[in-house]
Image (cartoon, helix red, strand yellow):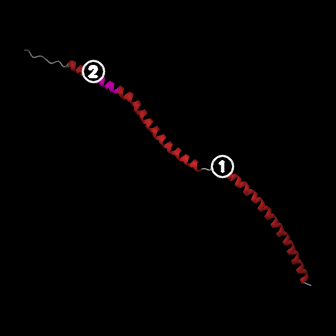
């Protein structure tokens, strides 16, 4: 038996080819999955944003519940109208009282004038 030489060159060729195919496959996989990862991150960011908006909307709804309703504003308008009418009455009463005080001042000044003129005699 003569020494046969083991020829592994076909195995090396197949190993290199398999390595190249594996590298190509991983590259394609990464390219395909990179969009998916970006989309997953964007979806996660949007979910966080929606949760934040949900909280803000809930607080706005609570604020709106505390605001007066249309009927409350109507009652307030009626009360202000009544208040204006009462103020007109008070103003008329004050004008009458001011007129009375003015007349009394005239009478008092006449009495003082009379007393000053008759007191000298």
Where are the magenta residues, as a range?
A: 16-27
- Mark 1–mark 2 Cα distance, whole angstroms, equals 83 Å
The label on residue 84 is none
Quadrant in the picture for residue 86:
bottom right
Q: Where residue 22 sits in the image (x, y, percent)?
A: 30, 25
Q: Which residue position is annotated with label 1?
A: 71
Foreground residue among 36 and 54: 54
Dominant secondary structure of the residues highlighted in magenta in the image: helix
Secondary structure of the residue carrying tag 1 is helix
In the image, taking residue 36 as reference, residue 93 lies left or right, namely right
Where is residue 9 shown, x and y percent of the image?
Answer: 20, 19
Picture layout, residue 6 above or below residue 72: above
Residue 100 drawn above or below residue 40: below
**Residue 17 shown in magenta:** yes
* Magenta run includes residue 38: no
Position of 81 with respect to 15 (left or right) is right
Residue for point 19% across, 19% down: 8
Mark earlier in primary sequence (1, 2): 2
Residue 51: horizontal and vertical position, in percent? 47, 42
Looking at the image, which is closer to me, 19 or 75? 75
In which quadrant of the rendered image does the C terminus lie? bottom right
Q: Which residue lies furthest to the top in this view?
A: 1
Of the residues tagged 1 and 2, which is closer to the observer? 1
- Residue at 89% across, 83% down: 119
At which x and y percent is residue 100? 83, 68
Quadrant of the image containing the N terminus? top left
Q: Nearer the viewer, residue 58 or 30?
A: 58
Left or right position of 6 against 121: left
Please identify the quarter of the rendering in which residue 103 is found.
bottom right
């Amino acid at each position: 038996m003569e020494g046969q030489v083991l020829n592994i060159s076909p195995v090396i060729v197949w190993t290199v080819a398999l390595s190249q195919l594996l590298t190509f496959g991983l590259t394609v996989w990464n390219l395909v999955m990179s969009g998916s990862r970006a989309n997953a991150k964007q979806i996660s960011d949007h979910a966080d944003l929606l949760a934040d908006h949900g909280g803000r909307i809930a607080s706005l709804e609570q604020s709106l519940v505390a605001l007066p309703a249309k009927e409350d504003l109507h009652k307030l308008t009626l009360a202000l109208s009544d208040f204006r009418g009462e103020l007109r009455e008070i103003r008329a009463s004050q004008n009458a009282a001011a007129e009375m005080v003015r007349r009394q001042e005239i009478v008092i000044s006449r009495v003082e004038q009379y007393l000053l003129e008759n007191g000298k005699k």
